[in-house]
Amino acid sequence: MLCRLKSFIKQPLQSFIVFIFFISAFGLSACGQSGEPDGADSGNGNGSVTPPVLTKSIPIDEGGTQCPNGGEKIEVGVDDNGDGILGPKEVDDTTYSCNSNSSNDETGGDNNKSYFLGVTVSGLSGGSLILRLNEDEQLDVTSDGNLTFSTPLNNASSYNVTIATQPAGQTCALINGKGVISEEADVMDILVSCSVNTYTVSGNVSGLDEGKTLTLQNNGGDDLEIITNGPFTFHKPLAGGLTYNVTALVYPVSQVCSVTDGLGAISTEDITDVMVKCVAKTIPSNFIRTPYLQNVTKNSVDVMWGTDESISSGMLYWGSSPGNYTNSVSSTAFYAAKDNADCGGNKMPTYRNIVHSATISGLTAGQTVYYYVSSEDGNVGFNDPSYKATAASPDNASFRFIAYGDSRPTCANPYPVDNARSRLINTMLLHGPDLILHTGDIAINGRLKQFDDFYFAPTAQIAKSTPVFTTIGNHDIRWNGTVQAYRDLYSLPTNSIDGTEDYYSFDYGSVHFVSLNTALLPDGYRNGYKNSERAAEMKDWFESDLDSTTKTWKIIFFHRQYYLNDVDTAWRSIFEDNEVSLVLSGHAHHFDSHSRNGVTYIVTGGGGSPLAGAGMAWPDYRIDTFSAYNFVRIDVTQNSLYINVFDIGNTLRKRIVLNK
C-alpha cells in the first residue's frame, strides 16, 4: 500500500481540492525526502501507479446536529484498493458544507456552527405573550423568566425577534430584537419588558360655590381636592379589570355633593363620565335632633334622631357606600318627656318632640357602613360620607376612645360667649375616636330642651359617626328626682339589675367598660332619686359583672369624683380586688389624675361647664391637676393603654402609659 501524506488530514476542504489537482497534473510517486518512490524507476513509466485521492458528498436533511438547516457531509480519502469507490476505511477526513444565508458556508470551518437566541421576559402578569423569530418559530410565553428559541442559526445569519401578540391588559416592549450573529456566540441580550395598561378616572364638577373646597376620593384612598367647577382627573390611573368607586370625602361648607356614575369597572378605556353635583345643604325644619349613634356592638349600631310632633314615622337606610343603600328599617317613634318649666322653675310653653330609634344590624366586627335617615318631608345624610357607622372592633384589635364630662352650661349663662362645648368637639374631631365616654352633667337639670340645646346641637358633627356612651350626672336628673328625658334620649345597654340604663356594662375590643351611677349613693344630690337599696343592688351587680369578664382591660366611668367619701367607700376595694386598670370621672371642672394600689384615677370635668380651680384629694395622696377645658384620649392595645390629655387648643397637657 502507498504511504499517505500525513499532513493533509487536518486541512480544510480547499487543501484537498488543491491536492487532488496536484496529483492529477504531476503524480504522487514517493514518500521519502527526495520525493521519489522507494525501489521504483523515476519517470520511465515502468513504476507502480499511485492510488488516486477521492471525495464523497452525502446530502444532510434539516435538523441534523452538524447542519441543522441541511447541507452536505464531505468525506476525503485515498482509494487504497483502487476500486474507484471511497470506502469507510479509506476516509481520511470529513468536513461539512451547511446551508445558510452566508456566502462562505461552503468553506466549512466556524461558519458552519449553529447558535441560539435567548430572551429575558419581565413584568408579565397573566395572559399570554407570543414572540416570533424570523417569521419561522413562535414562542408562547406565560410568565417571567429566561427563554430560548429552539431554532439555531449559523454565524453571520440575520435574526429578527418580534412581538406577535401582546398579553391581555398589558403592553410589552422589545429591546435588542434585531441583528446579525457576528460574535460566533449565542445571542442572549434580547429583553422584553411588560407593563399593565392603565386608565384614568375623570369627570366634571358643577354647583360648587366660589371659594369652597370639595374633596373627592376614589377607591377609599386616592384623594383629590377640588376648588373650582369643571373637569377633574384622579391622580392614580387604574389597571384594566379593576373597579373604581368615586365618593365625596369632604363636603364644602354648607353644601352636599352627590356623585353620579361613580362606580364601575375599568375595561380598555379611560373613564370620563363621573358627574359630581353640589347643592346647598339644608336640614329639614322638622328635625330637632340630627342622627346620632348609640349602643355599638360587634354586630349592630343604634341610630337615633328627633323630629317635631308633625312627624310620627321614619326610616333608616344603610349600605356599603354613600348612595348605595341596600338595607332599610322603620324607626320606633315615641314622645320624649315634655317640659313645662325652664331651669329656674319658671313656667314656659310645653316643649315636647318625637324620638326616633332604629338599628343597623347584620354587621361584622369593625365593618363600616354609610347611612341616612328619612322622615316624611325630608332626609338627613343622603349621599354624605360623613354619616357612617362602624361596628365595634374585633376582640384583640387596637382602638381609640375619648372621655370627657361636665359639658352643661349654667342657668345664669346658658349660652356663654366662649362656646367652649362646640370648640372642644371640633378639637376632638381632629383625633378620630372610635367611641366617646361622657362622664355626666350633660343638661342643667335634666330637661328635654336642655339636652337638645346644650348637648345634641354642639355634638352633631361628631355624634353622627361616633357612638357615645354616657353616665348620669347630678345635673341630668330633674329636681323632682326623675331621669325620664335622659332615658328617652339615649339608647344604652340595659343589663343592669333592674333593666334600666342608669348603670350598665359593655365590651369593645379588649376592654370591658362599666358605667356606674354615683347619684344613687348616700351623698347623691337628688332626694327623689338616690336610693340605698338600689345602690346596694348595683354594688352586688358590679362585683358579679367584673368577675364574669375575661377582657384584658377593665375601665370604669361615672360622674362624681372617685375620692369623695361615699364613692371611695362603696367601690374602691372592688377596683383594687378586681384588677381595674382605669377609673374615669367628672364633676370637678378641671383635670386631675392619681394612682393608688394599681388603679389609675382620672377626673376629666372640663367639657364646657365653668372652670374650677385645683380639685380635692385624698389625704396624704398627691393629685396632678390643672384647670382648663380638656378631654382624655386613650389608645388601647393588647398590652398598653396610652393616655394623652389635651386642652381645647389641642395642646398635649399630660401623658400616662399603663402596661399589662
Image (tube, rainbow, N blue to C red):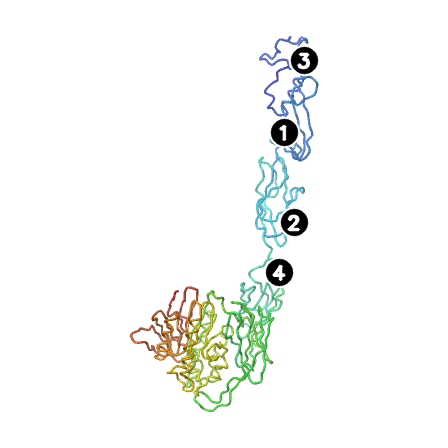
Gap between marks 3 and 1 measured at Cα: 32 Å
Do the CB atoms of the residues marked 1 and 2 lie less than 8 Å apart?
no
Q: Which numbered marker is on residue 195? A: none
In the displayed structure, 226 sits above or below 617; it is above
Tag 4: residue type? Answer: Ile
Residue labelled with disc 2: 165
- Horizontal relation, residue 104 to residue 479: left or right: right
Q: In the rendered structure, which disc, 4 or 3, sits on the residue that comes first in sequence? A: 3
Tag 1: residue type? Answer: Gly
Residue labelled with disc 4: 266
Residue labelled with disc 1: 108
Q: Toward the viewer: 506 or 63? A: 506
Tag 3: residue type? Answer: Val
Residue 463, how many percent across, how many down? 49, 75
Counting other residues with Cα less than 10 Å from the Cα at mark 1, is it few (<14), some (14-19), or many (20 or more)? Answer: some
Gap between marks 4 and 1 measured at Cα: 59 Å
Counting other residues with Cα less than 10 Å from the Cα at mark 4, is it few (<14), some (14-19), or many (20 or more)? Answer: some
Residue labelled with disc 3: 49
